[in-house]
Amino acid sequence: MWLIEKTLKSIRKNNFETEMLMAAERLSQDYENDGELTVFTELDFEDFYEIR
């Protein structure tokens, strides 16, 4: 059972990574040409602090 479980987890992880790569490739043109999708990347290196 342990081997089957590990094999299934490995297959799921591989499928997830493949799907994410395909999605990123499909959206790459949108992110390169549409400034509205990347407007917040200017804030990537800003420090944010949560106020409670």
Image: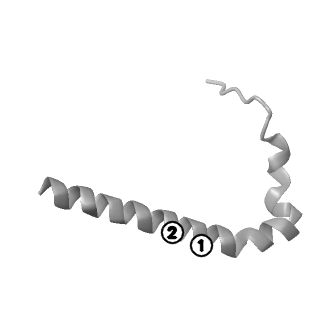
Coordinates of residue 41 in the picture (x, y in percent) = 81, 48
Residue 3 drawn at (x, y percent): 18, 57
Quadrant housing residue 34: bottom right
Query: Badge 2, how many Cα within 10 Å: few under 14, some, many 20+?
Result: few
Find residue 51 and report its horizontal and vertical position in percent.
66, 25
- Of 8 and 47, the residue lying toward us: 8
Relative to 35, 20 lies left or right:
left
Residue in view at x 84 percent, y 66 percent = 32
Residue carrying label 1: 22
Q: In the rendered picture of this protein, how many numbered marks are placed on residues? A: 2
Q: Residue furthest left?
A: 1
Q: Amino acid at mark 2?
A: Thr
In this rendering, is residue 30 above or below 44? below
Residue on which disc 2 sits? 18
Looking at the picture, which amino acid does disc 1 mark? Answer: Met
Task: Report the Cα–Cα distance between label 2 and label 1.
Answer: 6 Å
| 19 lies left or right of 27 | left
Task: Report if the CB atoms under discs 2 and 1 are less than 8 Å apart.
Answer: yes
